[in-house]
Image (cartoon, rainbow, N blue to C red):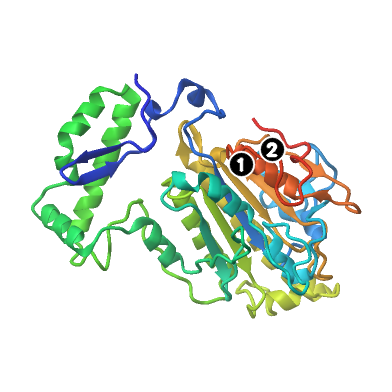
Amino acid sequence: MNVMHRRTVLRASGVAIGLPMLEAMQSATARAGFAKDSPIPRRMFCICTNMGMMPEFFWPDGEGADYLPSPYLKLIDRHRNDYTVFSGVSHADVDGGHHAEISYLTAAPHPSAGGFKNSISLDQYAAERIGVQTRFPSLSLCVGSENNTLSWTASGVRIPAQKKPSQVFKQLFVQGTKTEIENQISKLRDGRSVLDTIGNRAASLRSRVGRNDREKLDQYFESVRNLEQKLVKVQDWERKPKPLVDAKPPTDVEDHTQLIQRTQLMFDMARLAFETDSTRLVTLTIDQNANPKVALPGVQDGHHSLTHHGRRQESVDQLRIIESAQTKVFGNLLGQLKETGEGGQSLLDHTMVMYGSNLGNANSHDNKNMPMILAGGGFRHGRHLAFDRSNNYPLANLFVSMLQQLGIETERFASSTGTMRGLETM
């Protein structure tokens, strides 16, 4: 059986249709496991929640594989073997409390200093090297009332983040001019399918692949036909354009108190972007600086003000409700990535998900001891890598390990001193 390229499409008479991941698109090495020469793309999703996580509820007890999960980690302990927890890590000379969020992926020192100029962010460093492999080199997202971003160019220019899931969906999955759409509607109303146009090529393809791939192609083509029949009923394809994914366009949640729902929508957009290989690099900042409160039972006060709790029990209890909900929705993301198959493995196996905060302790605006989790992406997980909380280990070393896992040959990024000690690949 010949090996096919991941981006193989069937073309005929101006029609092109993409194909799902087939066994024929993978080398024998790739089918056996995650390998450096695997055609299955590697991805990176970097997330920052800029209000921190209360240390006493985040850090586990013990280290290595036998750690005892903290109250927050218990909420996602079902995925324990899919992530690594880091403690005692931060960026050297990155200070300034909330200002440090702009250095979350750059490690540029003293972000609150006068005349500060940022440097290139982790995602953009990667995008400069592998971004040409996808339609969109990278995707910058934001949840919150301000258009914050984690992404910065090499010249220190802010890359605006998108905050409306509907616009992200449109950018990723809606395409075609008005004329092209109208022509396709006309064909569909006549009972024709784009599959009719490429029928001979599809038949030829079926004869060249194995049984499993033939079954997968049949299921895929059937789903395309079913989707087309649904679209025939749409009077105006411009108002409801053809999706390239089996998902409904999201409805934006304009209520800024709905933090969890808004976060879940952006997680969904990132997952769909990865699943369709529209991009391999996504950042998401969860910005709660200006939001009044979070709509959760038991929460009455604003998220930002609660982080300055001064150890008041009522405030601590409310903040714990918010941060627990955030942890749960992060766990949902990991579960969805695990449930999405790709090449005999899962989307999580090929996607690094880094979740953390620029604040180690929001109550004191401390930027040391940043809470940090890395999930998926072909690393050996299930451990707590504990470093010196008085003399922190460079978080940028993790960035170097992640860049190398993306296939980028580099030994240094920002303030790194090497790769992340103790983090091993599969």
Bin the neighbour count of mark 2 within 10 Å (Cα to Cα): few under 14, some 14-19, many 20 and up: many
What residue type is disc 1 on?
Answer: Gly
| Residue topped by disc 2 | 381
Q: Residue furthest top?
A: 1
Residue at coordinates 52% horizontally, 45% vertically from top-left? 337
Q: Residue furthest right?
A: 390
- Disc 1, disc 2: CB below 8 Å? yes
Q: Quadrant of the N terminus?
A: top left
Q: Quadrant of the C terminus?
A: top right
Q: Is residue 113 left or right of residue 150?
A: right
| Residue topped by disc 1 | 376
Residue 390 in the image: x percent, y percent? 91, 54
Which of the numbered marks, if any, corresponds to residue 150? none
Residue 96 in the image: x percent, y percent? 79, 70
Residue 15 in the image: x percent, y percent? 20, 46
Residue at coordinates 43% horizontally, 50% vertically from top-left? 278
Q: Is residue 261 left or right of residue 317?
A: left
Q: Is residue 304 above or below residue 59?
A: below
Q: Is residue 25 left or right of residue 402?
A: left
Q: Is residue 41 above or below residue 274?
A: above
